[in-house]
Image (cartoon, coloured by chain):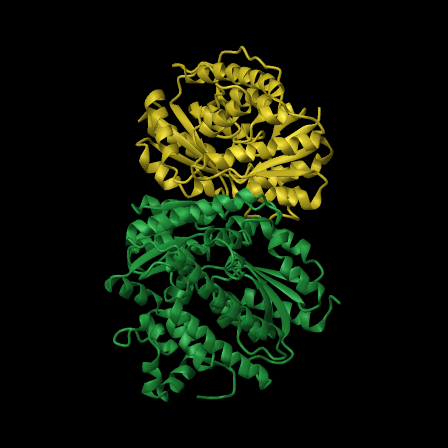
Amino acid sequence: MNNIPGKITMSEWSEIFNSLPEKIIERYCYYNNNEWGRYLQPPATFFVYGARELKRLKFDNSLAALRMWGFVFNESERLFRAKQSGKKVIATCGDLGTVPVIIMGFPDCIPFYPECIWWTPFFNESNVLLEPAHQLGAPEAACFSKAALGAFYKRAYFPKPDLIFASTGASCDDYSCVLQLIEGLGYEIEWLEIPYRRGFDYPERFVKYLTNEYERVYKKMKNLTNFDKPEQLAETIKKINRLRLRVEEIKALVYNADISPLPALELMVIEFGNLYGYADIDEWLDIVDMIYETVKQRVAAHQGVLSPDAVPVAWITPSADPYLLNLIEDYGMRVVETEYVINQALVKIEEAIEPFTALAKSFMKASLIGSTRERIARIQKAVAAGRIKGIIITNMLGASHCAMETGLIGYYLRDVPSITIDVPAPSGITEQIKNRLMAFAETLRQGYYE
Amino acid sequence: MELIGYTCSYIPVEILSAAGYRPYRLLHGDFGLMEKSDPWLRVDACPLVRSNLGFLLEHQQRFVAVVGSTGCDMSRRMLEIVDAITDIPTIIINMPRTDRLEIYYDEIDYLIKRLAELSGGRIDDEQINRQIRVWEGLRNFYRHYSEKRRENPSRLSTVSFHHLVANFHQGNTQPVSYSQLEVSNLPRVFLLGSPVGYESTFLLKIIEKYLRIIWDYNCGLSRFLNVKIKGKGVDGIKSAYYQQPPCILRRPNKKFYEFIKKKIVEYKPTGMVLSTLDYCDAYEFELIKIGNIFGLPTLNLRSDFSFQNRSQLETRINAFQEMINT
């Protein structure tokens, strides 16, 4: 393995992979099963499986990153394996980060987020999930989370869930509508109500509303599994907190390093791992620890994957197309702050209080249940501190919160330039988008705005 | 009297009125108003929301507050923009999407508290009961007109009905009568879909040139008539508003479909016109289901409140009429 950090192509990874000793490949497996749980594979393997965008992407060249990609791309297989081996597979939709904590407290229960399949059409450069979604009623101008509808319809991307929990209320309308269509396919959905926060001095009863919902989740799970040890939830919370803390440590290292020690794409995948550990929380924790060690070593050695003069920017709303995260780095920018609508999955869950209440309180910090001002407060602070020179906002045409928030985000963060990109359909990143990003980077570099 | 804006069918006008304000439902659908909100909203925002924001920006001084709910994401978020760029106070209540009666009841109590703070007075049961009498009386008055649409042959156009009920939506507590007979033997249809704006008469006129709308379930038309307050005081209001036939955004939305099916049996329309606004998630996601589930010929119309597709709309409506007649 090359010890000099950098970003490499899929083909370069294949060459390096060929030189990896077998014992390393054998070392990593999901569900702790060395017989069928190995996942360390080069990106080219997943390219062959259909992830055609991989040929355009550049990846971090560390073993930790290789392990991460192998694990993440393997999720579909893992979920089917879980089902085959008698585990319960539970779909948790819409809340992005809290309900899975309850599910993980039950033995052999695997939570996953169907909406996270929104990356698949982009990795696959294919409309194979979006087209059926449109035929089933999702508008073309709607959030790419509609890919979940296509996946439920096709039944080939994850096994039929044993239970489906879906959050609705003060969330985005698009996904709530997608879930309604999924229910229309004949899936039974347990709906959970999410309250609107109304400021951080919200009434205590909002916590109670959520607590009731989480207790309902627990009861459903208890009935499904015949397992009833509420104290287990406290243990799971500790585990989740360990993950969240580790991810915050990685982010802090990456954001504050002189030279960025990890690409933005890998860091986004790491952040989203907080939602459910990509369907094997223990293995994911181990991967994140390994990434942390890699990043720490790089920072200590003053090594990184980007140019030292890369311009620091913040990224608001995750991009369904991973290629964009690559591109901005190619053009000389680096991501040093994010708001990927998953704040609820990043915060520490209180451990000294009743677990359901702790979960409810952590969810009350969610990105989309309050105001835009609250959502981007962290980025506002970073702008005020001079840590951020520009803002990149990625949107989806027709997605309810994107349409309403973009203007306000620009208003609240008006001290720095911002650029808004409507993420196009798969394979849709045009020269025009590239030119806009290049021009944005150029503007930031030259400091015209200052 | 100062206006208090509101955005949702689950916000009780009786309570807004008891606070001493004139309840004004934000139901604007004007292309010119939309342009005024352009600095704040993307083109893929709901045209009704864009138009309402434009109206609020243009008439800020007339509004003492705006009350919204979480019933629809874009409407809720509009209030944050109002809060950020105007001096109009905003109040947002949680309108549960699932069957969580206690949340709605608590939120109505919160609304009353906030309105009392805003008006500097108390809102007591006596005031509430007085307002129930006023507004329930108005609903009864307009129910009578809605029934005229239903008669066979229909004796009132929805164009005229729309004009009449705009008075209710704009907080006019004086009943406005209409005595002209508008008998029609055109095919009898239902109207479903996104809210019908105050400025949407042109669309209704085109539809009713070829069809007669005998019932609807649209905000801005007769949806408010489904609220029937039987009890007294705040509890009577809470119960009536919560029990009204559900919004399509309720989860699951099975009861919405059951309600419409019941109405189809009752009214026996020969077709259905589904009118949606651009980017209206509530209905756009359900178009296929609505087209399939009721067993009626259905025409989907889409609008952004502009007149640009007027001729195309007319051709399609005309073709729909021919199809029904055949």
Q: Is residue A349 above or below residue A293?
A: above
**Would residue A137 be seen by someone viewing this image from the given angle?**
no
The residue at the point 43 percent across, 29 percent down is B245
Q: Image quarter for residue A278?
A: bottom left
Q: Quadrant of the C terminus of chain B?
A: top left
Would residue B56 be found to the left or right of residue A53 on screen? right
Q: Is residue A213 left or right of residue B132?
A: left
Q: Position of residue B254 (x, y in %)?
A: 36, 36
Q: Is residue B203 above or below residue A327?
A: above
Look at 56% across and 44% down and name the residue there. Answer: A204
- Left or right for B169, reference B241: right
Chain A's shade in the image?
green
Q: Residue at x 34, y 48 (%)?
A: A220
**Residue in the foreground of this view, choosing between B277 and A99:** A99
| Front residue of this view, candidates B135 and A249 | A249
Above or below — where is A111 with respect to A371?
A: below
Query: Is residue A163 at all visible to an observer of this figure?
Result: yes
Residue A186 location, quadrant = top left
Closest to the observer: B151 or B111? Answer: B111
Residue B112 sits above or below residue A432 on the image:
above
User: How many numbered badges does the structure rendering display?
Assistant: 0
Please state the horizontal and vertical placement of residue A70, each as a whole percent of the image.
38, 74
Position of residue A409 measured from the top left corner of the image (x, y, whole percent): 63, 55
Quadrant of image for the N terminus of chain B: top right
| Residue A248 in the figure: left or right of residue A391 | left
Residue at far right of view: A450
Chain B color in figure: yellow
Between A66 and A227, the one nearer to me in the picture = A227
What is the x, y in percent for residue A107? 32, 61
